[in-house]
Amino acid sequence: MNLRHKEMQAMINVGIVADDLTGANTNCSLFAPLQGISAITVFGEGIKDRQIIQQHNVVAISTNSRALPVKQAKKIVAQACQALSDKRLLSKRVDSTLRGNIGAEIAATLAVREHHVAVVVAAYPVSGRITRNGILYINNVPVAETAAGLDVKMPVTDSGVANIIHQQFDTPIFSVNIEQLNSRADGIVKYLTDNYRNEKVVVFDAVTDGHLEEIAEATYRFFKDKIIPVDPGPYTYHLAQAIARDPQVKHQKQNYLLAIGSVSSTTLGQIAALKSSRRCFLAKIDCRQLMASIKARKAEELRVIEQVSAHQDYEVFGLVSAASEQDLIPLADIAKNHLCTVDEVSAIINQSIASIVCTLLSRFKHQIYGLYTSGGDISEAICQQANICALQVNGAVLPQVLSSQIIGGPYHGVQMVSKGGLIGNQDVITHCLDYIKRINEEIS
């Protein structure tokens, strides 16, 4: 696999709302074989775990809403869409036979992303599901005449895709039939340009995998980021690939992420030297807030994440626990005030730093050369937080300054250099960043 293809796959960032667990897993299975992609299915209380959702490229949420009353289905789908708000592409996965609350769930999804268009491609050709002239066929039989029409919970009573949607969602629908698909992506774009009139739902025929690829290319060119794909999976997959191929999307690595938990005077000197030589933004985490309460800790973590994210155009960004001598943390005093040990205070601070780092890695992995950590326990806390169980050691940058590569998990392949707080001269951080860049270039 060439570098360009690896970079393209790393850009994939998809959230999928599926009405059952099987559907969620099916969509994840399309993405999972791609190198550098981590695809997970979330359900139940997992929908509230924002951290795990942010850490993975592809996240499918199973709402288990196929047979629910319409009002309840719309509510849970809206909640799932909100949970996936950080994902660039939000997909509404529907059953390949269009059973369930199809119209209601499309409406709920559009209500969350109100400026988007639902592009419905009810086709899974390798499984015998195709749409021709607006009719969904299962192995060449109209869907309402198959077993789906006799489903005990949610029978399909019509074979027309637009008609099925209209049963629960009264909205204008624009249809693109098989004749337009034969003109490939350029012709589809022209047809949309000449005929589309801002309908919120667009329904496409599709008979072959080639059709799905052409539809994905054309719809992304026409609608750009305003698409909600509604399909059993393959169209979403091809659309994600089309987005990742966009030359306007940044692929070039350009940043370094720093997490400095050490509070020694040596480290403070190293930070000062870095700031004098590189365009750098390091947010200072308020360790007292981390100890105030669980609510205050989460708020402080979010503040730092958003502050760092706002400076993603800087060459170097990250966080520090102290930026000057005045910031040095009186761990013993904090421990005494909270009736705990210094080790317990240190562990909480390290866990929060690790949580912030994992979120930032998730958001900016595609543009980060690598991760630099300073402080004996920071690297270990990050590995625990991200469920990283293996590091491939590259070697020593300097004595007791180690270079490694993350193996497995959502951050597979990320380069990391870690050192103790009392190690190195003032220029050690810059030296480490140059080393990380060199390692990346050698791998490429």
Image (cartoon, rainbow, N blue to C red):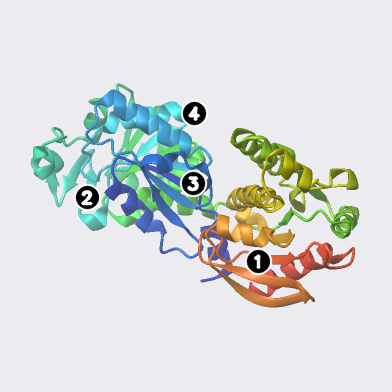
Name the residue type under label 2.
Arg
The residue carrying mark 1 is 415
Residue 111 at x, y percent in the picture: 42, 26
In this picture, is 281 found above or below 176? below
The residue carrying mark 3 is 53
Q: Can you see residue 278?
A: yes
Could you tell which of marks 3 and 4 lies nearer the N-terminus? Answer: 3
Q: Are the residues at dot 3 and dot 2 in contact (C-beta closer than 8 Å)?
A: no
- Judge by depth and name the residue closer to the eye, 341 or 351: 341
**Neighbourhood count class around disc 4 (C-alpha, 10 Å): few under 14, some 14–19, many 20 upward:** few
Q: Are the residues at dot 2 and dot 4 in contact (C-beta closer than 8 Å)?
A: no
Could you tell which of marks 2 and 4 lies nearer the N-terminus? Answer: 4
In this picture, is 397 found above or below 253? below
Residue 340 at x, y percent in the picture: 67, 45
- Checking the image for residue 115, the label placed there is 4
**Neighbourhood count class around disc 1 (C-alpha, 10 Å): few under 14, some 14–19, many 20 upward:** many
Residue 145 falls left or right of residue 119:
left
Residue 14 at x, y percent in the picture: 46, 47
Residue 277 falls left or right of residue 22:
right
Q: Are the residues at dot 1 and dot 2 in contact (C-beta closer than 8 Å)?
A: no
Q: Residue at x 73, y 55 (%)?
A: 258
The residue carrying mark 2 is 129
Could you tell which of marks 3 and 2 lies nearer the N-terminus? Answer: 3
For residue 289, what is the image quadrant? top right
Q: How far apart are marks 2 and 4 (CA)?
A: 30 Å
Q: SS at mark 1?
A: strand
**Neighbourhood count class around disc 3 (C-alpha, 10 Å): few under 14, some 14–19, many 20 upward:** many
User: Considering the image in quadrants, where does the C terminus appear?
Assistant: bottom right
For residue 156, what is the image quadrant? top left
